[in-house]
């Protein structure tokens, strides 16, 4: 039910047209799909691929990867070819009925570490008011869905995460409302990319009065501190979106929406040896930039100005009507290069992996029968 709701959300998130001219880079699929994980290999019924794959390198050079459900567990292994699921829960989702506690449903969706031991994670947090008595006047999850980006920290290489004392990275400037009637919030952060002494990520917002829905860019020079992140507002990185339950907030603070992204950016990487960045995202077919549904990529000389999107992999996505998908949808693209130089795999060379989720559709329902797949990519124009 949660993922079928994305189809309803897509139309509200279309960004403005007119992106910058395309760059010279080209991506193409360069190998068959490999199944890296299927729910039958999980520890219990909660282990389904439900977020983009994110990896960091621990102090002993082993790898730690996340990308499952809101009972957060990690894959661990010596390299990307030998990752095994660790059944220890690193971050739970207690279902707290108090929206101010930010402890309902949490997904680890981005990682930052300088040493592989002390790790910060961006959390996609969902408050489902329909699951808590008196919290929402509607019965559908979509009408009661309140999203916030939080930060959690680990001091043991990702074996345990705890929310920071002031955990909010980005919140809409109002509280969860029993009468809200639609999905509200900031959600689905991309991976974190270090660049010129700062860290960056993209996240989507559903918008509010004066704030269009779309994708915004955030920056921090101290990414381990949740309250240090600021979004671009059209002039500089000055837009602050603090916790509305604990701070005075402003309805007039807005972030600049970045084209050509219609909805969340799954992968954001810097191409080694160049001044180019790559972004990969999923999109539904429309009459403008996206001739078919599937995964698209865009290239840019910086993180604000991007070229036209190009199709990478065609296929029905979570944004399409599940009744007409042909029994399969794809979602959550991420790009991981096993030769990455950064601990958080924020850079790529000419032969990275595309990781993504493939989910089976039964009737008109996207099911929890999902596999984590990967396919080799060829980046043309890379050094």
Image (cartoon, rainbow, N blue to C red):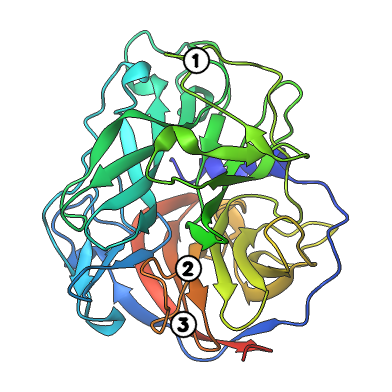
Disc 2 is placed on an element classified as: loop
Picture layout, residue 140 above or below residue 122: above
Does residue 290 show up? yes
Question: Which of the 4 image quadrants contains residue 361?
Answer: bottom left
Q: Is mark 1 on a helix, strand or loop?
A: loop
Q: Which of marks 3 and 2 is in front?
A: 2
- Residue that carries the numbered disc 3 in the rendered image: 375
Q: How far apart are marks 3 and 2 (CA)?
A: 18 Å
Residue 240 or residue 285, whichever sits in front: 240
Residue 123 position, x and y percent, is 38, 42
Residue drawn at 73 percent across, 68 percent down = 301
Mark 2 vs mark 1: in front: 2
- Mark 1 or 3: in front is 1
What residue is at 56 percent from the left and 80 percent from the top?
A: 272
Q: Which of marks 3 and 2 is nearer the N terminus?
A: 2
Residue 181 located left or right of residue 358: right
Crowdedness of circle 3 by 10 Å Cα count: few (<14), some, many (20+)? some
């Amino acid at each position: 039910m949660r993922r079928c709701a994305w189809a309803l959300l897509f139309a509200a998130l279309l960004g403005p047209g007119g992106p910058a001219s395309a760059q010279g880079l080209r991506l193409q699929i360069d190998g068959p799909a490999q199944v890296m994980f299927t729910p039958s290999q999980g520890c219990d019924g909660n282990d389904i691929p439900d977020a983009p794959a994110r990896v960091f390198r621990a102090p002993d050079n082993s790898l730690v990867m996340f990308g499952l459900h809101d009972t957060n567990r990690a894959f661990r292994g010596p390299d990307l070819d030998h990752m095994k699921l660790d059944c220890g829960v690193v971050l739970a989702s207690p279902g707290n009925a108090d929206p101010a506690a930010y402890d309902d449903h949490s997904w680890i969706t981005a990682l930052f570490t300088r040493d592989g031991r002390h790790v910060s994670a961006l959390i996609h947090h969902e408050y489902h008011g329909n699951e808590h008595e008196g919290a929402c006047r509607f019965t559908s999850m979509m009408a009661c869905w309140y999203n916030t980006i939080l930060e959690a920290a680990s001091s043991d290489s990702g074996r345990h995460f705890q929310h920071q004392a002031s955990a909010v990275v980005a919140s809409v400037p109002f509280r969860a409302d029993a009468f809200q009637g639609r999905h509200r919030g900031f959600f689905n952060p991309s991976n974190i990319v270090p660049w010129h002494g700062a860290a960056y990520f993209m996240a989507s917002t559903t918008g509010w009065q004066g704030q269009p829905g779309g994708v915004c860019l955030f920056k921090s020079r101290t990414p381990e501190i949740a309250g240090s992140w600021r979004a671009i507002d059209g002039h500089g990185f000055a837009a602050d979106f603090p916790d509305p339950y604990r701070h005075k907030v402003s309805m007039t603070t807005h972030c600049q929406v970045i084209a050509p992204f219609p909805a969340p950016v799954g992968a954001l990487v810097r191409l080694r040896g160049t001044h180019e960045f790559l972004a990969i995202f999923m999109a539904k077919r429309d009459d403008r930039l996206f001739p078919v549904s599937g995964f698209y990529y865009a290239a840019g000389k910086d993180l604000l100005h991007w070229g036209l999107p190009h199709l990478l992999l065609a296929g029905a996505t979570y944004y399409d009507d599940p009744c007409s998908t042909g029994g399969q949808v794809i979602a959550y693209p991420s790009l991981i290069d096993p030769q990455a130089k950064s601990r958080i795999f924020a850079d790529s060379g000419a032969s990275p992996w595309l990781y993504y989720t493939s989910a089976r559709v039964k009737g008109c329902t996207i099911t929890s029968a999902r596999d984590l797949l990967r396919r080799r990519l060829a980046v043309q124009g890379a050094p």
